Structure formats: structure tokens, C-alpha cells
């Protein structure tokens, strides 16, 4: 039998608890495998009651999740009886949020779970609680170190059936992007993407389309030199090491339906360059996947959505897609 998936509860005041509960409610319609939530069981019960969706919350250990799952939502209770305060975040809950992520990764390492799905967090709330990382991706890179000797290079990909994108620089001010963007950074990112598309997604020869940094990919140096001096050499090096990469491409013509047939993933030079298109095309279906890790991690491609928390108006589609993709990528292959 396959191990269950671990889901970290995320920000308690956001929609993480809502969409986890709804995913269990809709498990049969979507063919979801067993999963358990790491968080505060009392809060999950209160949120289920507030939503009025009749989901039984069952405190249990990861080892009990598979047998519990058909009858109720398994929850590993690491909280201390939080109040249910949708839309009203407080730094006091930050330590439980952080510990839920840490515990999920530890469960994978110790053979208690096969992958982790992380519900949305609030970076501001966690920072107020002493969290030292810009986001999930960077924190997961630190948690991955005990899995193996050598460097870990976490890479954020937003995946959907219609479009997959990777920002080379992530959570930094746009004013810092030109200085932080280097040929080596683009090549390292592209190599991780190509490797994981081949080994985890089963795409034998992944095709990467690389965006230019400037409008019109620099227009041959008329609108900035970065595309000629930084991006184009990276594309050449990716091809030299055997990765099918094209570019630099003008970003404004790279995301229409015909263009999307020419690649498997897009490398963007900064966050919004590629996240704006994928969230426009596949907002409800997008999944955040961290590549370059020695384990599988996915997450809904949306935030905490405080205004929707506890109202019943949150849509669980992205959480359901995240669970399904984590299950697919962590599927144990049958012995030959």
C-alpha cells in the first residue's frame, strides 16, 4: 500500500483549513489518495462546523491515516487548541505553521509519508514570528539538506496542464533583478528544470523556452544589453550541455495557444513575468511544485485569501490539483 500524503495546514486564518476540508469532502469525485493534515485538530473541527460541510475530523498518527481516511479527515494534532479566527491572522500561530511544514518533510524522510502538500502561508505573519526565509521554497531547501550530501537547489515551478513556468529570480524587488540575474543562475535553474521534467514528469527530452529580461528581448541591444550579454549565453550553454532551450524570447508573444505547443516549460527572468500569465490562464488549476528537492512538494497556486476564509466561498480546485499531482509524482513504480 502507498504511504499517505502529508498536508501542512498553512495559515490558520486563511483558506488552508477550508480547502483541505473540502478536498477530503470531494475525495471520491476526484479520485484522491489518502492524506492527512498536520496542524491543529481543534481548529479544523471548528472550521468544518463554521463551513457546515459535515467533514469528520479524526486526530491520528500518520501510520493510521490510510485506514482512517475513508471515514474522516485524518489530522496529526500539533496545535494547542487554537481559536478559529478566519481573516484575523496573529503571529502567535506562526510556530505551529512552521512546525507543520518541518514535520511533513521529516515524515517523508522517516518513511511515514510519500510527499508533502503545503497549504498557503502568510510571509508577513511568519516573519513577525521570527521566520527567517522569504517563502516556502527557500525553507524547503534548508529542510532538504539532511536527505543527502551536497548542495540543494530548490526551484519554484508553477505547473498546470496548459502551461508550466519557472521564474529564475523569485521573491526579490524588481529593482534588484538585473544585478542578481547571471548566466550561471539561468543555466543552473534550467538544468534543474530539465532534469526534473525528465525524471519526475516523464518528459524524455524537455523543451525550455527562455524569456528575455527586457521588452522585445532587448531588441538587439536597443532596449538594454542584458539579453545579449546574460540571457543569450545561458541559452547557448544549456544547448551545449544537451538541454533543448530556445530564446531569449519576447515574453509578450510566448504565452498564446500556438506558442505553448513549442515548449514544455518557460523560464522567466523575474517572478511576475511568468506568474502573471500562468495565473491568468490557469488560476484555479495551477500548482506550485518545488523542483530540485530530494522529495515531492506541491502547493496550491494561491495565497491565504483572508476575505474568503470561513465563508464557504473558497474553491478547492488548486488544492485538489496539488494533491493529485503530488500523488502522481510520488507514485511508487511497480517492480520490473
Image: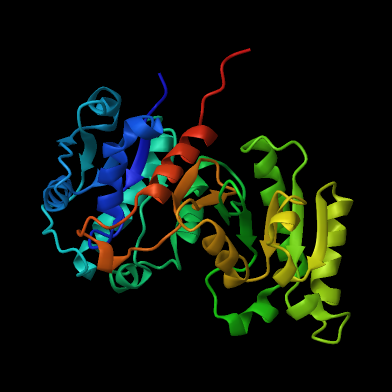
* Location of the N terminus (image quadrant): top left
At which x and y percent is residue 146? Answer: 49, 44
Colour pattern of the rendering: rainbow
Above or below 127: residue 81:
above
Q: Is residue 229 visible?
A: yes
Q: Is residue 230 left or right of residue 163?
A: right
Q: Is residue 9 visible?
A: no
Quarter of image, res 22: top left
Nearer-the-camera pick, 119 or 252 = 252
Q: How many marks?
A: 0
State left or right for residue 59 relative to residue 271.
left
Vertical position of residue 85 compared to residue 298: above or below: below
Q: Give me the residue at 40% from left, 68% from top.
A: 132
**x and y percent of residue 144 in the render?**
50, 47
What residue is at 25 percent from the left and 26 percent from the top?
A: 70
The residue lying furthest to the top in this view is: 336
Q: Nearer the viewer, residue 176 or 222?
A: 222
Q: Position of residue 67 (x, y in %)?
A: 26, 22
The answer to whether residue 190 is left or right of residue 282 is right
Q: Eyeballing the image, is 225 above or below 333? A: below
In front of the other: 301 or 238: 301
The residue sitting at 62% across, 59% down in the picture is 166
Residue 168 % position (x, y): 65, 65
Amino acid at each position: 500500500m502507498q504511504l499517505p500524503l502529508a498536508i501542512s495546514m498553512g495559515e490558520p486564518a486563511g483558506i488552508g483549513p477550508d480547502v483541505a476540508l473540502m478536498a477530503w469532502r470531494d475525495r471520491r469525485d476526484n479520485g484522491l489518495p489518502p492524506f492527512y493534515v498536520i496542524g491543529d485538530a481543534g481548529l479544523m473541527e471548528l472550521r468544518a462546523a463554521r463551513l457546515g460541510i459535515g467533514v469528520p475530523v479524526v486526530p491520528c498518527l500518520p501510520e493510521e491515516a490510510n485506514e482512517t481516511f475513508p471515514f474522516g479527515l485524518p489530522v496529526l494534532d500539533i496545535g494547542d487548541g487554537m481559536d478559529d479566527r478566519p481573516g484575523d491572522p496573529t503571529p502567535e500561530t506562526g510556530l505551529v505553521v512552521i512546525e507543520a511544514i518541518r514535520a511533513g518533510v521529516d515524515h517523508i524522510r522517516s518513511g511515514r509519508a510519500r510527499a508533502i502538500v503545503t497549504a498557503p502561508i502568510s510571509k508577513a505573519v511568519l516573519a513577525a514570528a521570527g521566520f527567517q526565509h522569504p517563502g516556502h521554497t527557500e525553507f524547503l531547501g534548508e529542510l532538504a539538506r539532511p536527505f543527502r550530501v551536497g548542495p540543494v537547489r530548490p526551484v519554484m515551478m508553477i505547473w498546470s496542464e496548459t502551461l508550466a513556468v519557472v521564474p529564475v529570480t523569485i521573491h526579490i524587488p524588481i529593482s534588484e533583478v538585473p544585478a542578481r540575474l547571471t548566466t550561471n543562475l539561468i543555466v543552473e535553474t534550467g538544468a534543474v528544470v530539465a532534469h526534473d521534467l525528465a525524471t519526475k514528469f516523464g518528459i524524455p527530452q524537455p523543451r525550455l523556452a527562455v524569456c528575455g529580461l527586457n521588452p522585445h528581448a532587448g531588441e538587439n541591444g536597443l532596449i538594454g544589453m542584458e539579453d545579449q550579454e546574460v540571457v543569450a549565453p545561458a541559452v547557448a550553454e544549456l544547448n551545449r550541455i544537451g538541454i533543448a532551450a530556445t530564446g531569449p524570447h519576447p515574453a509578450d508573444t510566448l504565452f498564446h495557444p500556438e506558442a505553448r505547443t513549442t515548449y514544455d516549460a518557460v523560464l522567466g527572468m523575474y517572478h511576475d513575468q511568468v506568474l502573471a500569465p500562468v495565473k491568468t490562464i490557469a488560476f484555479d488549476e495551477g500548482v506550485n511544485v518545488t523542483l530540485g528537492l530530494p522529495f515531492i512538494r506541491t502547493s496550491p497556486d494561491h495565497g491565504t485569501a483572508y476575505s474568503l476564509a470561513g465563508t464557504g466561498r473558497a474553491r478547492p480546485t488548486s488544492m485538489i490539483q496539488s494533491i493529485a499531482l503530488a500523488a502522481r509524482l510520488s507514485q511508487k513504480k511497480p517492480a520490473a
